[in-house]
């Protein structure tokens, strides 16, 4: 239990203190989030979250991770990959880098991070050759990096949409469903987002920015890969299913409509709901409740058979119901 609680409290406190210091030390207009016709916030906010959270999370992993089972072979590449995205994200927040630079950095970071998983890390050894599986993991990680960035659009969305599944996953390690290394990585991320909560709650004073969402997406993707190894591939997919489903369904809708998917937009289900009159708290509550259901479903996949099939069905149904509610317009009273 201490291998989970202590990292969580430590990184949460460190993140909150460091973020407060960053906010005090930097000019009030530094990395201010512009309010445009696509914005889902109406008050000034600053994209400073990543400047504090990422250092706190990485330091926590190096202090507590090895004792929990994370090897230097994993930590060194993961740290380098996260730092690369942290720097690129900061530069993009400041200067809006070309898309080619962003994608190239994500590819490099993902290749390095997947290499750190080690040669013995396999998810589908009976179905895929090693190199093909590695290539698919890199593609999946790039996708998860971007969808985390896409979903950081309203107050507390990343906290509820990603922090809660990570906290549940860390709790699973206490009962032996996943390894302590997986649990430590999950709880370090969840702890960082817990510290971020106090500044990102409505009305948010701070957003993650690309310097936060990109490395958090990378590290979270690695965490769910490890959950898929420790539990089942289905569990690794179910835990972040709301994020995956909202981002993927929005992408498909835009492709069908013939839109340029590289252009900025505000068409995610949670963004549609916000503009239709949903309060931030009602959206976040729906996401949090759905993620609790997904956590229970992820656990049920461990047993196999009918319980696994039922868990997958319930998980998909819960996410579909929430997405339909968010997209249908103003919530009923």
Image (cartoon, grey):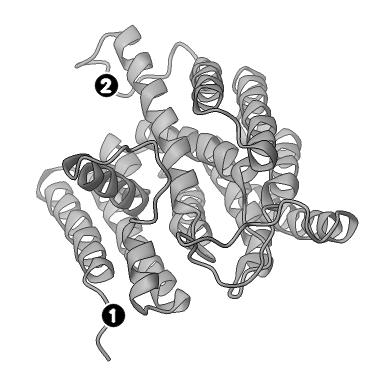
**Label 2: few (<14), some (14–19) or many (≥20) C-alpha neighbours in 10 Å:** few
Q: Is 328 displayed left or right of 100 in the figure?
A: left
Q: Tell me where residue 101 appears, x and y as whole percent.
A: 56, 23
In this orientation, which residue lies closer to the viewer: 182 or 250?
250
Q: Quadrant of residue 84?
A: top right
The image's mark for residue 124 is 2
The image's mark for residue 87 is none
**Label 1's element?**
loop
Q: CA distance from mark 2 to mark 1?
A: 43 Å
Query: Is the residue 3 above or below the residue 225 in the image?
Result: below
**Label 2's element?**
loop
- Is residue 179 visible to the viewer in this orientation of the structure? no
**Label 1: few (<14), some (14–19) or many (≥20) C-alpha neighbours in 10 Å:** some
Q: Residue at x 52, y 55 (%)?
A: 163
Q: Quadrant of the C terminus?
A: bottom left
In this orientation, which residue lies closer to the viewer: 14 or 150?
150
Q: Which residue is mark 1?
A: 330
């Amino acid at each position: 239990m201490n291998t989970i609680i202590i990292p969580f409290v430590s990184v949460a406190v460190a993140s909150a203190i460091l973020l407060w210091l960053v906010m005090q030390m930097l000019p009030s207009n530094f990395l201010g989030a512009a309010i445009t016709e696509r914005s889902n916030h109406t008050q000034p906010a600053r994209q400073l979250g990543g400047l504090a959270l990422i250092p706190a999370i990485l330091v926590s992993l190096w202090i507590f991770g090895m004792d929990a089972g994370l090897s230097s072979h994993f930590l060194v590449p993961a740290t380098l990959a996260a730092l690369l995205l942290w720097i690129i994200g900061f530069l993009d927040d400041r200067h809006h880098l070309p898309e080619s630079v962003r994608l190239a950095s994500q590819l490099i970071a993902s290749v390095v991070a997947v290499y750190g998983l080690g040669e013995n890390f396999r998810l589908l050894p009976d179905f895929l050759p090693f190199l093909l599986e590695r290539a698919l993991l890199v593609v999946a990680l790039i996708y998860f990096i971007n969808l985390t960035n896409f979903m950081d659009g309203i107050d507390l969305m990343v906290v509820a949409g990603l922090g809660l599944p990570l906290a549940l996953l860390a709790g699973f390690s206490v009962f032996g469903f996943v390894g302590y290394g997986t649990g430590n990585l999950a709880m370090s991320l969840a702890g960082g987002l817990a510290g971020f909560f106090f500044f990102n709650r409505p009305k948010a004073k701070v957003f993650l920015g690309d310097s936060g969402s990109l490395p958090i997406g990378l590290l979270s993707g690695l965490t769910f890969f490890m959950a898929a190894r420790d539990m089942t591939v289905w569990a690794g997919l179910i835990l972040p299913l709301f994020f995956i489903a909202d981002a993927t369904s929005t992408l498909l809708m835009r492709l069908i409509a013939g839109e340029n998917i590289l252009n900025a937009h505000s068409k995610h289900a949670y963004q549609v709901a916000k503009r239709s009159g949903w309060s931030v708290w009602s959206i976040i509550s729906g996401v949090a409740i759905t993620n609790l259901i997904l956590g229970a479903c992820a656990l049920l996949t461990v047993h196999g058979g009918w319980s696994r099939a039922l868990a997958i069905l319930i998980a998909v149904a819960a996410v579909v119901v929430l997405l339909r509610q968010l997209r249908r317009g103003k919530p009923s009273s």
